[in-house]
Image: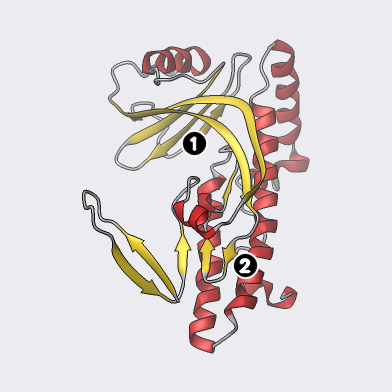
Amino acid sequence: MVTAGVKKAGSAEAEHITASFLVGCDGHRSIVRNLSGIKLTEEKEYPACFLMADFADNSGLGREAHLFFSCHGSVESFPLPKGQRRWILQTDHPINPPDTELLIRDVQRRTGYDLKGSKCFSESTFRTRRFVCQSYYSHRVALCGDAAHVMSPVGGQGMNTGFADTEFLAEALFRHFSNSEDFQSLFEDYDHFRRIAFKVAATRAERGMWMGTRRGTLASALRFLLVKALLSPIFKKSLPDYFAMLTIPYRSLKANDNGHH
């Protein structure tokens, strides 16, 4: 059994909860991971810096996500619920505090879209990192999502990889409780297969970020030629699934029964 002390917001007293297992889904600064003594490995900080803000969506892009590449840097844009759209601008250096005026100016310069007059709901700045924990579990404690791993945000796969972690782990716990399967063996499979999935997703995201963040006239020209080649009929059918990372392996424990190690 696992006993966890939790505090409600604004409360000084901790409530103690006892459960068969504890799953840490508490982000890249995971308290659960730290208290469990699980260390990080493959730590890397990328040089790319980004400024991000969510605006009321007056772009006319609807439900489409767009990537813009220029010799000055990249811009990512994708829709959010409630009529909002997120804009992510590559910057020369960390911008602290976030500068919305700079984002509006450079988004227009690089994409042609004018965000002036659109309500801004939130803004932040971030650096890009990569790490994975040395183990996805310790005894009866398991980790999911950013608590277990962080990767380049290109392709938006950090969250999707975390969702796949929970799908795999939920099935493992279901097998333990319904069929009395040994949880230690199930957790070993969770660690083994999801670690492989992370490596595939993180490497693809890293390649995409490398290509998208190259700056300068020559780099932009070479990127244009590369993208044009990738959009040719030879790669046209396979590229969307690859780029959207719909082909990341080991999402489900059920799919791995033949490879149970």
Q: Residue at x 70, y 50 (%)?
A: 200
Q: Secondary structure at mark 2?
A: helix
Image coordinates for residue 79, horizontal then vertical, percent: 41, 37
Provide residue 50's location: percent of width, then percent of height: 51, 25
**Residue type of the residue flagged with mark 2:** Tyr
Q: Is residue 86 above or below residue 35?
A: above
Question: Is the N terminus in the top left, top right, bottom left or bottom right quadrant?
Answer: bottom left
Residue most extreme to the bottom = 179
Q: Quadrant of residue 135?
A: bottom right
First in sequence, mark 1 or 2: give its number. 1
Amino acid type assigned to the residue bearing label 1 in the image: Ala
Q: Which mark is residue 246?
A: none
Label 2 neighbourhood size at 10 Å, few (<14), some (14-19), many (20+)? many
Query: Which residue appears at 60% of the width and 71% of the height?
Result: 187
Q: Which residue is mark 1?
A: 65
57, 47: nearer the viewer? 47
Q: Quadrant of residue 153?
A: top right
The residue beneath circle 2 is 190
